[in-house]
Each structure stands twice: as structure tokens, then as C-alpha cells.
């Protein structure tokens, strides 16, 4: 540790020891300051420069050493020096003291913190480099956190020293003015009855509403910054444009239409999204047929002798499509149009925070809800392009049952499809790097499923990593490596990739607007489902964190309300 670091640590140690040993806190409470007020005022009247200099240095020292009592000292500045000089002295002293505390934290702790927790702080560091000044300004304007804690934490980040000082100087100015003004009125008290003076009441009211006022100011500053370079239309064609007609988009559209607001729903493919066309509905229909086949094979358990059935695989898959067709009218353009939704078939392109292009037409809208869903994630495994692979979107096109089916991924999608095909007569091999199926669930639940899958005749290669696909004539195969390093060759007729889903975040203008993504690859949203542009919201699989139909519908409710409220009121997703 350098000599300067040792000196700083000793200074803080001495200050802490003295604070408790000599009970210095008694000198920094309101009652003591009021008792000495007349003497301090008299001294300042006769020795203004000396009093102001001593006050300034004391304030810097108290702030730099993070000693409690800054609020009382600020009130004292107003009482002794008046509004103008009080604001001037406190504003500069507090900013200088805060910067010294910031520098002390940076010199003593930052290197150690960054070395030890650097990987975990990567996102924080990047955010501070990009928007550190705004974050600091917000904290300074909204005094919900102790200032000494802000000084300490900010010292551990990459924010520049000059930026820290200037933002602190400006950000604390409003709060300084309110407290100094309150102190000026407190200093005029001659009796307890003076507590009810209108001016004093206004001062305390300003202190009470400061966080709300500051929140409004910072919100306006943030909006001006984020919308810089865009021209807001003077008139709008619709209240809300919803992009994507899956579970999230359909629910959001209905809520907006139900509020008698104008809403335009844009879908480039099929109404109903994944749930209707490639997810919930077809998979549960397939599971139903597979379960019936399994029950027939166990007929004797139920007292049914000689029970048998032949699986007509094309008929099974056609039944899946018939179930989809039976439900389609509920998600159709006709139904949603009748409910007040303007449905547009085409590919949307967000060109500004208030405009969306589709089919050569520009739609001006107050808010945009992105509900573009997700698609199957295809891993970059060598040789995959050489084999015929399926995923959860195109598996429903099968009309010939694969005799040997390899399923990669033992999550919910892979597990349910693997078991269904096994019960319908395919020889299924299920491969996953995890030790048991459904690795995100409790281990005992995964173990129970493993036992049932083996009873259904499936081969489970758990704890195996896919290394390379290949072909040997007409034979397709995968080379997989187990945890113990042994290699296994798996031959198959079809391989189903079910290793997860990837959010649809590109191709419709979000990247051109600079909308940020989360670590999971979804659109980054706050607790109100707002992106960096408050009037552009996202819900469902594209926003995460849970890719479930019911979660998309749940989020859609809040996205629609926040889109309609236009910032006047915000509803937090609980």
C-alpha cells in the first residue's frame, strides 16, 4: 500500500475514533447549533471573511471525511450567511468535499474491487462510461441515498474526476438552495410560535417535494437526451402500434382497443404466433395422440386384453393441423378487426420512436409495443449444415415418421417432443450436457422423468456434449463426448434441435435506433417494460426473462397500460 493510501486510511480511522470517543456528534445536532446561533451570528457580523472561510473549510472537511451532520451545517449556513452567501459557500464546499471523498475511495479501494469483482462489474462499468454523468446527476437530484455512500460507490467506478465534480456541483444546487433557505428561516425564529410562519412552512414543503420535483426534472433531461436527433410528429395516425401477433401482441392489442384507443397490429407471418402455430397448440395435440397410443400399449394394466393400435403417423400430424385450424378463428384477423384492432399483414420497420413503416406506408404513432417473440436457437456445431435437421418450427411439416430420431436438448420442448415421438414408434435418443432431463427444475423431478423416458424405450445420453455432425454415405451421425472423455457415435434419420429459443430482436429497426439488449439477448426493458425510449415497450419472449405464453400475456397487460398512459402514470410489472 502506498504512503498516500496509508495516510488516507489513518485520517479516516482518526476521524471515526474521535467521533465516538469525544462524542463530536453533540456539536452537529440542531439543538446545539440553535443554542450557539446568536454567538456565531455576532462573530460572523464582525469577521465575515474569517467566519466564511472557517465555515467553508469545516464543511469541506466534514464532507470529505463522510462525517454525519451535513444537513445541520447546511441549515446553519443559511441562518448565518443568508440565502445568497449560504448557497455559494455550501454549493462549492459540498462539491469539493464530495470530490475529495470520491478520490479517497478511488485511491484506496477501486483497484482492489475491480480486480476481485471485475467480471461481475463489467456491465456496471460499461454503463458508467456511457451514462455515468446522468446516473450521478439523478442521484444528486433525488436525495434518497446518503451522499457519503454515493461518494464511496462512485469512486469505485470509471467516471472521470472532473465530470464527477461538475455534475455534483450542478446536481446538488437545487437541494442546497432548498436547505439553505430553510436554514435562513430557522435562523429567524424568536419563539416556538415562529414555527408556523408561512415562509418557513413553504421551505419545509420544498424539502418534502424535492424528490418528486427532481424526478420530474431528471426524467425530462433523460427524454431530451434519448430523443435527440428525432422529430416528433405534430399529429398521429394511431395511439399504439403493436408489432407481432403472438400471445403478447394479441393481448396488448385487445387491451388498447378495449380502452377505445386506436391500435394497429402488424404481423408478417401468421396470426397467433408460436403458441398457436408451432408451440403450445400443436405440441399438446401431439402429446395427446402419443398418450393415447401409450395407454393402448398398456391395455392389460386396465383390464383390456389384446388391445392394440397401429400408429398412422400422417394422420396424427394431420390431426395436429386440424386442431390448429379449429382454434385459428379466435386469433384471426377477422375477429380482431371486429374488436376494433386495425390488423396489417406485412413486415414492420421502426424508423423513429414515433414512426413505423409497413408495406410502403408510414404510420405515426404515440407508442410502440414490440412483441416479436423468439425462434429456435441453432447452435454452431460443425457439420450441422450437412445433415437434415428439424426444430420446433418445422417439425410439424413431417408426414413420415423417422425411424431413428436424435433429439438435442432435454429442456421442456426437447423432452415433450422426444417422449411423444418415442410413444408413436420412433427410436429416440435424447442428448444433453445436463445430468438429468429438465435441468432447470428440481433434480428429483428430472430423475422421475428420466425413469419414465427409459420405460418408454428412449436412449438417454445425459452428460454428453455434441462435437460434430457428419455423413457416411446415406447414414447421418453425431459424434458426442461424455463427461469422462469417451466418444460415442449416434446414427439417426432425423435430428431435432431443441436447445432453447433466441429472441427476435433484429430486422425491424431496433438496432438502428440503438435499443440495448440484455445479457440474455433479449430487448433490455425496465420494470415498466420500457426500452431506452420510454414510448417504445416490449413484452413476451422478446423481452424475457421467461419465455412462456402466460408470461407474455401477463406482460402485455402492463405494456398496453404504460403505452396508453404516455408517461403520465406508469405501472410496474410485479
Image (cartoon, rainbow, N blue to C red):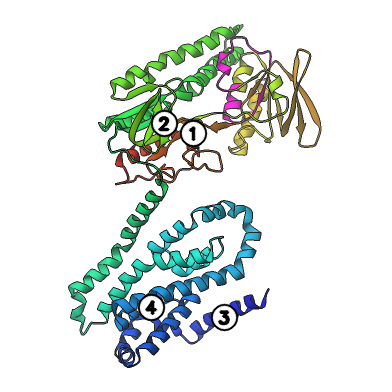
Other residues around mark 2 within 10 Å, as few (<14) / some (14–19) / many (≥20): many
Residue 59 image position (x, y, % from top left)? 43, 79
At x 50%, y 14%, the residue is 320
Quarter holding residue 69: bottom left
Q: Are marks 1 and 3 in contact (CB under 8 Å)?
A: no
Q: Are marks 2 and 1 in contact (CB under 8 Å)?
A: yes
Q: Which residue is mark 1?
A: 541
At x 44%, y 30%, the residue is 349
Q: Secondary structure at mark 4?
A: helix
Residue 415 magenta-drawn?
yes
Residue 175 magenta-drawn?
no
Other residues around mark 4 within 10 Å, as few (<14) / some (14–19) / many (≥20): many
Other residues around mark 3 within 10 Å, as few (<14) / some (14–19) / many (≥20): few
Provide the residue span drawn in magenta.
392-417
Front tag of 3 and 2? 3
In the rendered view, would you say 516 is above or below 73?
above
Mark closer to the chain start, 1 or 4: 4
Q: Which residue is mark 3?
A: 11
Q: Are marks 4 and 2 in contact (CB under 8 Å)?
A: no
Q: Which residue is mark 4?
A: 89
Mark closer to the chain start, 2 or 1: 2
Residue 75 appearing in the image: no
Q: Secondary structure at mark 2?
A: helix
How many angstroms separate mark 4 from mark 2 (CA)?
Answer: 55 Å
Name the foreground residue: 495 vs 62.
62
Residue 34 appearing in the image: yes
Q: Which residue is mark 2?
A: 248
Residue 412 image position (x, y, % from top left)? 57, 29
At x 80%, y 36%, the residue is 485
Amino acid at each position: 500500500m502506498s504512503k498516500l493510501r496509508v495516510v488516507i486510511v489513518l485520517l479516516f480511522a482518526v476521524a471515526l475514533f474521535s467521533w465516538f470517543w469525544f462524542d463530536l456528534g453533540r456539536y452537529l445536532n440542531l439543538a446545539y447549533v440553535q443554542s450557539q446561533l446568536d454567538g456565531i451570528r455576532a462573530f460572523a457580523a464582525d469577521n465575515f471573511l474569517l467566519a466564511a472561510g472557517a465555515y467553508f473549510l469545516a464543511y469541506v472537511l466534514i464532507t470529505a471525511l463522510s462525517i454525519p451532520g451535513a444537513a445541520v451545517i447546511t441549515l446553519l449556513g443559511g441562518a448565518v450567511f443568508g440565502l445568497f452567501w449560504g448557497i455559494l459557500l455550501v454549493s462549492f464546499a459540498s462539491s469539493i468535499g464530495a470530490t475529495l471523498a470520491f478520490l479517497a475511495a478511488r485511491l484506496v479501494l477501486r483497484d482492489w474491487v475491480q480486480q476481485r469483482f471485475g467480471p461481475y462489474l463489467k456491465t456496471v462499468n460499461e454503463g458508467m462510461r456511457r451514462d455515468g454523468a446522468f446516473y450521478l446527476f439523478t442521484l444528486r437530484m433525488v436525495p434518497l441515498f446518503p451522499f457519503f455512500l454515493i461518494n464511496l460507490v462512485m469512486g469505485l467506478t470509471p467516471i472521470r474526476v472532473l465530470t464527477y465534480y461538475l455534475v455534483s456541483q450542478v446536481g446538488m444546487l437545487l437541494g442546497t438552495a432548498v436547505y439553505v433557505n430553510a436554514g435562513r428561516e430557522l435562523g429567524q425564529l424568536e419563539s416556538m410560535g415562529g414555527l408556523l410562519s408561512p415562509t418557513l412552512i413553504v421551505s419545509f414543503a420544498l424539502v418534502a417535494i424535492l424528490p418528486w420535483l427532481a424526478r420530474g426534472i431528471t426524467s425530462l433531461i433523460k427524454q431530451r437526451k434519448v430523443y435527440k436527433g428525432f422529430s416528433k410528429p405534430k399529429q398521429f395516425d394511431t395511439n399504439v402500434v403493436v408489432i407481432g401477433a403472438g400471445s403478447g401482441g394479441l393481448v396488448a392489442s385487445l387491451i388498447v382497443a378495449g380502452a377505445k384507443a386506436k391500435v394497429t397490429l402488424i404481423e408478417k407471418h401468421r396470426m397467433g404466433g408460436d403458441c398457436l402455430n408451432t408451440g403450445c397448440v400443436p405440441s399438446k395435440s401431439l402429446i395427446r395422440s402419443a398418450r393415447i397410443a401409450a395407454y393402448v400399449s398398456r391395455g392389460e394394466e386396465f383390464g383390456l386384453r389384446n388391445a392394440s393400435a397401429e400408429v398412422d403417423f400422417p394422420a396424427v400430424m394431420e390431426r395436429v393441423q386440424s386442431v390448429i385450424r379449429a382454434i385459428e378463428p379466435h386469433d384471426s384477423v377477422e375477429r380482431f378487426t371486429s374488436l376494433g384492432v386495425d390488423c396489417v399483414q406485412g413486415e414492420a420497420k421502426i424508423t423513429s420512436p414515433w414512426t413505423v413503416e409497413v408495406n410502403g406506408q408510414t404510420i405515426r404513432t404515440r407508442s410502440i409495443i414490440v412483441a416479436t417473440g423468439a425462434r429456435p436457437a441453432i447452435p454452431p456445431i460443425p457439420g450441422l449444415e450437412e445433415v437434415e435437421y428439424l426444430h420446433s418450427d418445422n417439425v410439424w411439416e413431417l408426414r413420415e415418421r423417422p425411424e431413428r430420431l436424435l433429439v438435442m436438448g432435454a429442456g421442456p420442448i426437447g423432452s415433450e417432443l422426444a417422449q411423444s415421438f418415442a410413444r408413436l414408434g420412433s427410436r429416440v435418443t435424447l442428448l444433453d450436457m445436463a445430468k438429468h432431463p429438465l435441468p432447470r427444475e428440481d433434480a428429483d423431478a428430472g430423475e422421475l422423468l428420466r425413469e419414465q423416458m427409459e420405460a418408454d424405450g428412449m436412449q438417454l445420453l445425459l452428460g454428453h456434449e455434441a462435437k460434430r455432425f457428419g455423413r457416411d454415405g446415406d447414414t447421418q451421425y453425431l459424434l458426442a463426448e461424455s463427461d469422462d472423455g469417451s466418444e460415442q457415435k449416434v446414427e439417426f434419420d432425423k435430428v431435432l434441435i431443441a436447445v432453447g429459443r433466441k429472441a427476435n430482436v433484429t430486422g425491424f429497426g431496433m438496432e438502428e435506433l440503438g435499443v440495448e439488449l440484455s445479457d440474455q439477448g433479449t430487448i433490455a426493458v425496465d420494470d415498466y417494460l420500457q426500452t431506452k425510449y420510454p414510448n417504445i415497450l416490449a413484452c413476451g419472449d422478446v423481452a424475457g426473462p421467461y419465455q412462456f405464453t402466460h408470461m407474455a400475456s401477463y406482460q402485455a397487460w402492463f405494456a398496453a397500460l404504460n403505452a396508453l398512459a404516455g408517461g403520465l402514470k406508469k405501472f410496474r410489472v410485479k
